[in-house]
Image (spheres, rainbow, N blue to C red):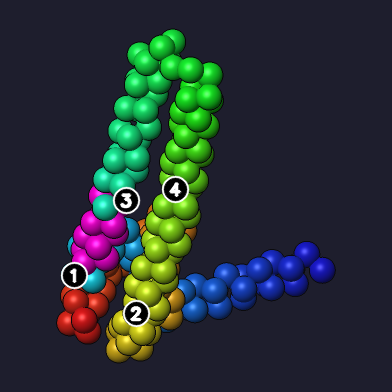
Amino acid sequence: MRVSLVVLGLLLFVSGSAYAQSSKIGFIDIQRVIRESKAGRAAKASFESEIQRKQQIIESKRAQLERLRNDFVQQGPAMNETTRLQKAEQIEKLDKELNRTRSDFRDDLQRKDAELMQKIFKDLETVLQSIGKSGGYTVILLQDALAYGDPSSDITQQVIQAYDAKN
């Protein structure tokens, strides 16, 4: 019984070793692909432009709110009760609007980021399949999922070049 377990273990080890020798595994650094590819850089530039545009809108509203608050503090004691209440309501309304705008912009930016990444991943899928088939790869993994990967198995640069050529 003991001998058969040892033989079984050796057979599994040998067959596993033979499989490992016949398989070809590559990995990519997806962040590097996004950072260095033409499409990734274009997506990042578009996203940053959108962020700046939205930040300008928020800053404009914040400055307007700050002016209203300062005016209220300076002129509040001289205002009659009705005017003071109207100004306080106006400040509160603008503050809520600013917070809502920030929240909406944050949600929009998260959605846009997800859409851009989804498009890049979809495009990369066909590039990776092509490289996988033409290069005889059994598996191509993301570097983030690896504890260790021999640098000779890193095909990131090849993927960037193929991705740039496709776009």
Q: Which residues, given as a range, are shown in magenta?
A: 41-52
Q: Position of residue 96 (x, y in %)?
A: 51, 39
Q: Earlier in the sequence, mark 3 or mark 4?
A: 3
Q: Which residue does the image show at 34% across and 77% down from the upper left?
A: 124
Q: Which residue does the image show at 37% across and 32% down from the upper left?
A: 65
The quadrant of the rendering that contains the C terminus is bottom left
Disc 2 versus disc 3: nearer the observer: 3
Label 1 neighbourhood size at 10 Å, few (<14), some (14-19), many (20+)? some
Q: CA distance from mark 3 to mark 1?
A: 24 Å
Tag 2 residue: 123
- Contact between marks 3 and 1 (CB within 8 A): the answer is no
- Residue 74 shows in this picture: yes
Q: Earlier in the sequence, mark 3 or mark 1?
A: 1
Q: Secondary structure at mark 1?
A: helix
Label 3 neighbourhood size at 10 Å, few (<14), some (14-19), many (20+)? some
Tag 3 residue: 54
Q: Amino acid at mark 4?
A: Thr
Q: Amino acid at mark 2?
A: Asp
Tag 4 residue: 101
